Image: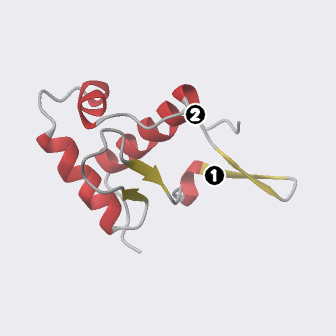
Amino acid sequence: MDALTARQEKCLRLIRDYIRREQRSPTHRELAKLTGQKSTHGVTQILRALQRKGYIRLEPTGKRRNIVVVRTPLKQLALIEGVILPVDSAGVGR
């Protein structure tokens, strides 16, 4: 499995945090705003790379909120008493 770039990892973390907080995935435009990009083109390229690497699935077009997280990088997980927990951006298990 290909490793994630820093930008891809940040984007994936933002998607996971957004879904956790809002109970739905962000739109591409919302994700562009969260990542500080002026257009959705850069976000689309990152999302395609994340999908190709097996971290997300993009639902068929026509849906605005079409991002589904299917895998988390190992460095974003913490093993606590035999249970794997997601790790937030500060490195603390949730």
Q: Identify the element where label 1 is drawn.
A: strand
* Callout 1 crowding tier (Cα within 10 Å): few <14, some 14–19, many ≥20: some
Residue at image position (57%, 33%) is: 20
Which percent across, then down, holds residue 62? Answer: 25, 47
Q: Residue 68 carries which label?
A: none
Q: Identify the element where label 2 is drawn.
A: helix
Quadrant location of residue 91? Answer: top right
Which percent across, then down, holds residue 42? Answer: 15, 43
Q: Which amino acid does label 2 sit on?
A: Arg
Which of these two is toward me, 61 or 55?
61
Q: Is residue 79 left or right of residue 65?
A: right
Q: Specify the farthest residue to the right.
A: 81
Quadrant location of residue 10? Answer: top left
Work out whether 43 lies above or below 53.
Answer: above
Work out whether 44 lies above or below 50.
Answer: above
Q: Residue 20 carries which label?
A: 2
Q: Residue 77 carries which label?
A: 1
Which percent across, then down, holds residue 7? Answer: 29, 45
Quarter occupied by the N terminus:
bottom left
Which percent across, then down, holds residue 5? Answer: 31, 54
Q: Specify the farthest residue to the front.
A: 62
Q: What's the coloring here? A: secondary structure
Q: Specify the farthest residue to the bottom.
A: 1
Q: What residue type is labelled 1?
A: Leu
> What separation in Å lies between label 2 and label 1 (alpha carbons)?
15 Å
Q: In this view, does 78 lie to the left or right of 49?
A: right
Work out whether 13 lies above or below 78.
Answer: above
* Callout 2 crowding tier (Cα within 10 Å): few <14, some 14–19, many ≥20: few
Quarter occupied by the C terminus:
top right
